[in-house]
Amino acid sequence: EEIKLLLGSKDAYPTGSEASRKVIAALEQHIAAMTEKIAVLSRVRGEFQKAAERLSGCGDCHDEERFPRRCGDCGVMKASGAPLAVQVLWQLDPPGEEGDKKAPR
């Protein structure tokens, strides 16, 4: 719908000046929205990359005593703090809440 409105903008106004101002304003709004989405997606991508890197350390895990309930006790997960995505995916207890079986926030 928004693209249709932009395509019809040229004919909707009496002058090129007015039409171009309206189209520029609409384009700038779209650019701002895209910029925000790109920033969010970049942060999520970074978090997912950190998670994949950390979880790659679990590739050789055969510790049946720890997996799946005590992964937070593992050196792989303790090494300089697990990324938030790993905490959520692996359902690790947040720091300071050992024993609480809730997924991290």
Image (tube, rainbow, N blue to C red):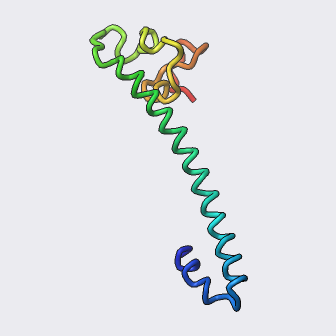
Q: Is residue 2 left or right of residue 26?
A: left
- Is 60 located above or below residue 25 in the figure? above
The answer to which quarter of the image holds residue 54 is: top left
- Is 80 located above or below residue 104 in the figure? above
| Residue occupying image coordinates x 51% and y 39% | 44
Q: Is residue 57 left or right of residue 45?
A: left
List x then y, in percent, for residue 14. Answer: 70, 91
Look at the image and tell me in which quarter the C terminus lies: top right
| Residue occupying image coordinates x 67% and y 78% | 20
- Is 30 located above or below residue 6 in the figure? above
Judging depth in this view, the residue of 88 and 7 nearest the camera is: 7
| Residue occupying image coordinates x 46% and y 27% | 50
List x then y, in percent, for residue 45. Answer: 47, 38
Judging depth in this view, the residue of 41 and 24 nearest the camera is: 24
| Residue occupying image coordinates x 57% and y 84% | 8
The answer to which quarter of the image holds residue 7 is: bottom right
Q: Is residue 13 left or right of residue 68?
A: right
- Is 98 located above or below residue 13 in the figure? above
List x then y, in percent, for residue 88. Answer: 48, 28
